[in-house]
Image (cartoon, rainbow, N blue to C red):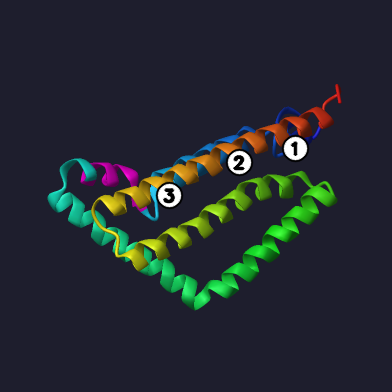
Amino acid sequence: MDLYQTLYEQIDMRSFSNLWFWIALAVMWSSVSHWVLGVPYDLVLRARRRGGAAQEDLEDIVRINTNRLLHIGREAGLWVLAIACFVLTTLAVTGFVYGFEFAQAVFCLMFPGALVGMMSLSTARRIQDEGASGDLLFKRLARHRFYTQLIGMVAIFCTAMWGMYQNFQGSPLG
């Protein structure tokens, strides 16, 4: 018996039944909800509680990150959008039309991430346009985090449902 065949039979290499896919999904959403516009959320909470130098640090980091995001959006936004749409469409077609499970899994990771990316650009623009600081900045960052977590919960739920459906389809019971 070939070693690779034995390993392949012992370890299911399909995406939705692979433990590493679910670990990657959890790590992705944990990281995305912790880093709000590139700022760790514990820094936001510390600045809200303490004020003073912590609040100035937060405002500086948010200003730097929003300027960076908006610069990228202005300079390469159209190209990034075109490439992202091409990749997501390719993944959707190969995954859901042609039934390639790996493409489905990557789409389930990337599509909600793209939504959060667009939301980040919108929030960055709003913060910059308003010149948000203090309580308004805390409100904008908290709202962004809430909607990011909401997108994450819906994405995890939909991915879990689709993954279970795919696992039942590939099992002897399906």
The question of residue 45 being in magenta is answered with: yes
Query: Which kind of residue does numbered mark 1 sit on?
Result: Tyr
Q: Which residues are magenta?
A: 39-47
Q: Is residue 64 left or right of residue 166?
A: left
Q: Residue at x 57, y 54 (%)?
A: 115
The question of residue 3 being in magenta is answered with: no
Residue 49 occupies quadrant: top left
**Residue 16 appears in the picture as rendered:** yes
119 and 54: which is toward the camera: 119
Viewer-nearest of discs 3 and 1? 3
**Helix, strand or loop at disc 2?**
helix
170 and 127: which is toward the camera: 127
Residue 17 occupies quadrant: top right
Query: Which kind of residue does numbered mark 2 sit on?
Result: Ala
Q: Residues within 10 Å of mark 2 (few under 14, many from 20)?
A: some
* Mark positioned earlier in the residue sequence (2 or 3): 3
154 and 165: which is toward the camera: 154
What is the x, y in percent for residue 89? 73, 60
**Helix, strand or loop at disc 1?**
helix
* Mark positioned earlier in the residue sequence (1 or 2): 1
What is the CA distance from the residue labelled 3 to the residue labelled 1?
Answer: 46 Å
Mark seen at residue 4:
1
Viewer-nearest of discs 1 and 2? 2
Q: Residues within 10 Å of mark 3 (few under 14, many from 20)?
A: many
What is the x, y in percent for residue 30? 46, 40
Q: Specify the farthest residue to the bottom.
A: 75
User: Eyeballing the image, is 16 above or below 118?
Assistant: above
The total number of labels drawn is 3
